[in-house]
Image (cartoon, coloured by chain):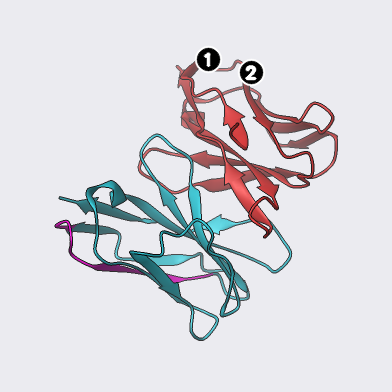
């Protein structure tokens, strides 16, 4: 069974630029999560989707972050404009509905200069 | 108060010893508890899940849960240098209105050959 796929793996941008990350979950996993992991900290949930609907985006900085999952499968997370403090690893995870066992993709390491 | 708390370490144990990792959580309504292993530069990998009070064993790993004390632990028997990683405790909570996982900051384990 293929795992969670993410791209790109690394991204370096200047502050105030925009960036987008892509995620494809494990086949059959209806629930998809985006996390931000800052160095030395645990992952922090940004947004949770169930199929193509948003379940929880309470911790998403909506003035600059947006996410979508239009067809209920893959998802994109966008940051516009980026700030220095957005430098982090962005992790996508997926799970079966009603299960909390989440499986993570390899992540995208973002550096904002 | 943080939702999930862990000692950041580092925790150093000699090869072959038992490593004991601890975690406390704040939400008494939590029902699902997980341990993830994260190697440096990699994404978290699910290694144990536990849902009921008591012990759950899987190979060299034993998870222990005490809901009355709001305490979860992970024991690693016969520790190997390959176990050197950061171990993240994750606990589910409905604090944001949705069923989400909250992660601790992780405990860094070093197994000394």
Q: Is residue A92 above or below residue B56?
A: below
Residue B21 lies in the magenta-colored region: no
How crowded is the residue under tag 1: few (<14 C-alpha within 10 Å), some, or many (20+)?
Answer: some
Magenta region, residue range: A13-25
What shade has chain B been given?
A: red
Label 1 sits on a secondary structure element that is strand
The percent coordinates of residue A28 (x first, y second) are 63, 76
Q: Residue B13 got which mark? A: 1
Q: On the image, numbered disc 2 is attached to which residue? A: B18
Q: Residue at x 69, y 57 (%)?
A: B99
Q: Are marks 2 and 1 in contact (CB under 8 Å)?
A: yes
Q: Which chain is cyan?
A: A
How crowded is the residue under tag 2: few (<14 C-alpha within 10 Å), some, or many (20+)?
Answer: some
| Residues marked 2 and 1, same chain | yes
Given the current orientation, which residue lies at the most extreme bottom position? A71
Give the quarter of the figure containing the C terminus of chain B.
Answer: top left
Residue A106 visible somewhere in the drawing: no
The percent coordinates of residue A25 (x first, y second) are 52, 70
Question: Toward which corner of the image does residue A6 lie, by quadrant?
Answer: bottom left
Q: Is residue A46 above or below residue B51?
A: below
Give the quarter of the figure containing the N terminus of chain B.
Answer: top right
* Nearer-the-camera pick, A76 or B56: A76
The percent coordinates of residue B71 (x first, y second) are 73, 28
Q: Residue at x 23, y 59 (%)?
A: A11
Residue A12 visible somewhere in the drawing: yes
* Nearer-the-camera pick, B104 or B81: B104
């Amino acid at each position: 069974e293929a795992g969670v796929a993410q791209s790109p793996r690394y991204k370096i941008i200047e502050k105030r630029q925009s960036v987008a990350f892509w995620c494809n979950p494990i086949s059959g996993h209806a629930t998809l999560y985006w996390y931000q992991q800052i160095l030395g900290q645990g992952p922090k949930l940004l947004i949770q989707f169930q199929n193509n609907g948003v379940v929880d985006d309470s911790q998403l900085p909506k003035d600059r972050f947006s996410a979508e999952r239009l067809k209920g499968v893959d998802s994109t997370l966008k940051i516009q404009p980026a700030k220095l403090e957005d430098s982090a690893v962005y992790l996508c995870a997926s799970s079966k509905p009603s299960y909390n066992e989440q499986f993570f993709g390899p992540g995208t390491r973002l550096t904002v200069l | 108060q943080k939702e999930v708390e862990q000692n950041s370490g580092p925790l150093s144990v000699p090869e072959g010893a038992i490593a004991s990792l601890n975690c406390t959580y704040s939400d008494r309504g939590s029902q699902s508890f997980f341990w993830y292993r994260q190697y440096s530069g990699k994404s978290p990998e699910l290694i144990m899940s536990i849902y009921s009070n008591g012990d759950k064993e899987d190979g060299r790993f034993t998870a222990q849960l005490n809901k009355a004390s709001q305490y979860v632990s992970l024991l690693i028997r016969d520790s190997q240098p390959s176990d050197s990683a950061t171990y993240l405790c994750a606990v589910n909570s409905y604090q944001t209105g949705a069923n989400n996982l909250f992660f601790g900051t992780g405990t860094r384990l070093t197994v000394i050959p």
